[in-house]
Image (cartoon, rainbow, N blue to C red):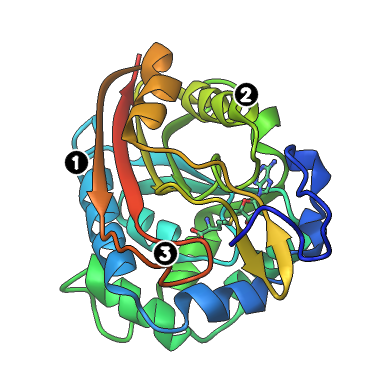
Amino acid sequence: MGSSSGEGEPLASSNSGYDWDAFDSEAYLDHYYREPHPDDVDLARRTAAAIAAAPPAGAALDIIDVGTGPNLFPWLCALPRARSLTAWEYSRQNVDWLREELAGDELRPLWRYYWDVVSPGHVPDENPVAAIAAIARVEQASIFDLPKAQWDLATMFFCAESITRSEAEFASACRALAEAVRPGGTLVAAFLDQSRGYVVADRPFPALPVDADAIRAAFHPYVGDISVEPIGGSEAETHSGYTGSLFMVARTR
Ligand SMILES: C[S@@+](CC[C@H](N)C(=O)[O-])C[C@H]1O[C@@H](n2cnc3c(N)ncnc32)[C@H](O)[C@@H]1O
């Protein structure tokens, strides 16, 4: 992925420079998630384990996922601990996609696969989407407008670094995520490792290249414990803009 739109125009730096309502949800899903990728399976397992271990032990939690996109696996991982589930997503297309997915009777084979991964021992004919829909709300809103201290736990997959090329916007997105969670709450997130952008249905979208130090620096003022670990990693892109990811778990101050 280069840094121009292909017509010689430089890509916008800012989140507001992209038409997020034109994000093609099914094309994105098809490109990134049609086949379960080993890195995503690893990510789902780690996410489910981090959520299961989140304090206070055993309590039901108010959980938000930010920049959800056309992806149900954050909710599949969160369901066993959730009192409420919120998706905070900016794109009209992705919001419509999420609402339709929640209204459907059938679980796509892809989500069945991830449900089996993150929830071993569940009753085989149980449909987690109905359970998710019963406690979920989908908000069309920006990460930069998150209210403070409303949730016990926040997840965020490939959002803060994948919606902008601006370091300042990345930092404020990370701050907004951390401040949305009550003190002593949990953040679980994944970031593209050193990505420069990605393409969805021929439309370029931005990314800020980040590494583990940049993630620690962005969250440092707002968290006590933080761990950032690599997942996967290859020389070449396996998917548009993806060569590996960085998995973060942190506890808010
Ligand atoms: C790379 S996609 C990640 C989607 C999904 N979380 C995943 O794991 O595949 C980035 C997502 O961030 C959303 N987004 C873009 N700008 C945003 C903003 N200002 N606030 C919240 N979400 C935003 C996009 O619509 C898109 O769903």
Q: Which x, y percent locates residue 220?
A: 37, 17
2 or 1: mark nearer the eye: 2
Q: CA distance from mark 3 to mark 2?
A: 29 Å
Q: Which residue is mark 1?
A: 53
Q: Is mark 3 within 8 Å of ligand 1?
A: yes
Alpha carbons under labels 3 and 1: distance apart:
18 Å
Q: Report how far apart the C-alphas of labels 2 and 1 lie in the structure.
A: 32 Å
Q: Residues within 10 Å of mark 1 (few under 14, many from 20)?
A: few
CA neighbours of label 2 inside 10 A, class few (<14), some (14 to 19), many (20+):
few
**Residue located 39% across and 43% down the image:** 189
Helix, strand, or loop for circle 1?
Answer: loop
Q: Position of residue 146 (x, y in %)?
A: 64, 30
First reached walking from the N terminus: tag 3 or tag 2:
3
Residue beneath disc 3:
73
Q: Is residue 244 visible?
A: yes
> Mark 2 belongs to which amino acid?
Ala
Determine whether the residue tagged by mark 2 lies in a helix, strand or loop.
Answer: helix
What residue appears at the point 38 percent right and 63 percent down from the top-left corner?
76
Residue on which disc 2 sits: 168
Q: Earlier in the sequence, mark 2 or mark 1?
A: 1
